[in-house]
Image (cartoon, coloured by chain):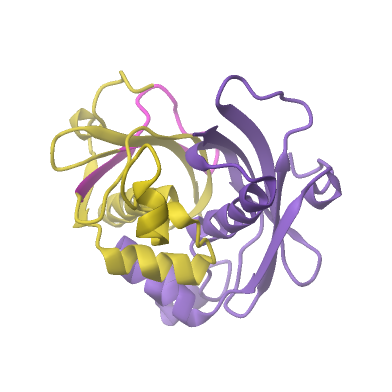
Chain colours: A yellow, B purple
Amino acid sequence: MANRSPVRDLPGAAQFSKSVSESDVYQFAGLSGDLHPIHVNAAYASSQPVGQRIAHGVILIGLMSSACTLWAAREGLDIVSYGWDEIRFIKPVFFGDTITTSYAQDPEREPVGQKWYSVADAYNQHGELVGVGRHTAYVT
Amino acid sequence: MANRSPVRDLPGAAQFSKSVSESDVYQFAGLSGDLHPIHVNAAYASSQPVGQRIAHGVILIGLMSSACTLWAAREGLDIVSYGWDEIRFIKPVFFGDTITTSYAQDPEREPVGQKWYSVADAYNQHGELVGVGRHTAYVT
């Protein structure tokens, strides 16, 4: 899965970029209730293999959703999210990293009724793949 | 998938409950960049089948992650999130809904090396199943 082609190269791909701040992570910890120390406890995180606090993986799904929203707006589609599959957090996202997500229709899967199938990925500012996923949108 | 047994009934299940507020949704829209009008535009949402603004599905994944974090703390496991599969948003989550998520090891999948497999679900205050997912944790 990590070896697949970048989503940005697929026809009609939409992209979204954002630097993930400490405040993003702390706001997300508060609103979700996920206060895992790897996200909000610098002393704990420094004792772990990753060595420092990291963003919640779920934030990365949110950034991929943003690319989805831009894609749907451009396509003129009213959608709601049906679900995600094969989400993988490939590398950690550190505070301050700039993440670029891409979203495009899966070239290997035609829509079935109101369900549209897409692929998404996320790269950091070093060009490293940090996450991937498959999304199903329900077109209303 | 929607017909499977509630995760709360599985051995060792952890639970987390939270009412999802308008501020949660608006904070998440800001930090993720996902300003889809179904989440932040009441006039648009009222024109859609769902009839009102709904929470981002990704917030629901965050609430399931919170149950995961509580589960890992109780089990004394240091984990990072490896990924999610088969996430389905079964019913909309409206502002003010109280969501209870549950997380437990998948009774049908033994850990493989450092990968531990779990299931998660989410119910609203009416006892309706609103979301499900499968999680893989990487035990460090």
B97 is within the stretch colored magenta: no
Q: Is residue A13 visible?
A: yes
Where is residue B42, by image quadrant? bottom left
Where residue B5 sits, quadrant-wise, is top right
- Residue B90 drawn above or below residue A23: above
Q: Position of residue B28 (x, y in %)?
A: 40, 68
Placement of B114 over or under B123, stated as above or below: above
x 81%, y 65%: residue: B127
* Vertical side of A11 occupied by A20: above or below: below
| Residue A65 position within the rendered picture, expressed as x and y whole percent measured from the top left | 37, 52
Q: Residue at x 32, y 65 (%)?
A: A24
Residue that appears at 37% across and 37% down: A49
Of the 4 image quadrants, the one containing the N terminus of chain A is top left
The stretch in magenta equals A98-121
How many numbered discs, if any? 0
The magenta stretch spans residue A113: yes
Q: In the picture provided, is A103 more to the left or to the right than B38?
A: left
